[in-house]
Image (cartoon, rainbow, N blue to C red):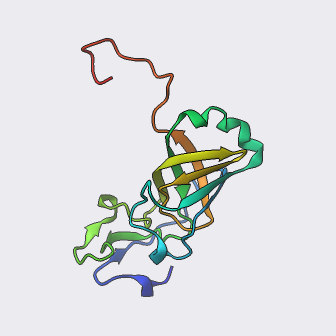
């Protein structure tokens, strides 16, 4: 990444190439957001419909997903810088450490969004609440809550 996209005061670090993670992209996210400036700061359940296009070979892994109103998507922010230590949040002047922000620019640019599941269309999920660029690689899909979770006995913690 070029240093000309740094905001005043932001700092970077030189790191060796990452070679210890072996992730498999399982699909792509389709959003109306073409540039970083187009993306909302955080997604909203009343935001535009977006598509989670899963590799069709993995479609059976979606069976039962319709039971979830809200799902969590993990994705790889493939167009993000990976060398920022401090950042100036959009619209802000205060420098903060990367790990204190939800910024897409981080050493391992993994993004996550809780989204509202509108419907399933085969290997495609239609959702609302995404805040990433069109074409972002998908890492994983998880329900926010599972209906098969065991309930704790009364008085032993949150239910």
Q: Position of residue 56 (x, y in %)?
A: 76, 47
Q: Nearer the viewer, residue 27 or 12?
A: 27
Q: Nearer the viewer, residue 158 or 93?
A: 158
Q: Nearer the viewer, residue 62 or 21?
A: 62
Up-down relation of residue 58 to residue 34 (above or below)? above
Q: Position of residue 78 (x, y in %)?
A: 57, 66
The quadrant holding residue 98 is: bottom left
Left or right for 5, reference 79: left
- Is the C terminus in the top left, top right, bottom left or bottom right quadrant? top left
The single residue placed furthest to the top in the displayed view is: 153
Q: How many tags in the picture?
A: 0
Residue 124 visible in the picture: yes
Residue 21 visible in the picture: no
Q: Residue at x 55, y 68 (%)?
A: 133
Up-down relation of residue 32 to residue 117 (above or below)? below
Left or right for 135, reference 35: right
The single residue placed furthest to the left in the displayed view is: 94
Q: Residue at x 68, y 36 (%)?
A: 61
The quadrant holding residue 51 is: bottom right
Left or right for 140, reference 37: right
Q: Position of residue 132 (x, y in %)?
A: 51, 64
Q: Residue at x 30, y 84 (%)?
A: 8
Q: Position of residue 49 (x, y in %)?
A: 56, 59
The single residue placed furthest to the right in the displayed view is: 57
Left or right for 35, reference 26: left
Up-down relation of residue 80 to residue 27 (above or below)? below
The quadrant holding residue 87 is: bottom left
Q: Residue at x 52, y 76 (%)?
A: 35
């Amino acid at each position: 990444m070029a240093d000309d996209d740094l905001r005043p005061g932001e700092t970077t670090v030189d790191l060796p190439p990452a070679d210890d993670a072996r992730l498999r992209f399982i699909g792509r996210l389709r959003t109306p957001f073409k540039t970083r400036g187009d993306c909302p700061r955080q997604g909203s359940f009343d935001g535009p419909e977006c598509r989670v296009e899963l590799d069709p070979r993995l479609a059976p892994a979606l069976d039962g997903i319709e039971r979830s109103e809200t799902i969590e998507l993990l994705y790889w922010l493939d167009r993000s810088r990976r060398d920022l230590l401090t950042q100036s949040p959009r619209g802000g002047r205060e420098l903060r450490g990367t790990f204190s922000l939800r910024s897409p620019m981080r050493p391992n640019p993994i993004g996550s969004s809780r989204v509202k599941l509108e419907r399933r269309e085969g290997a495609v999920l239609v959702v609302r609440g995404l805040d990433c660029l069109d074409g972002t690689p998908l890492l994983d899909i998880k329900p926010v809550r599972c209906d098969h979770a065991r309930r704790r006995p009364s008085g032993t913690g949150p239910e």
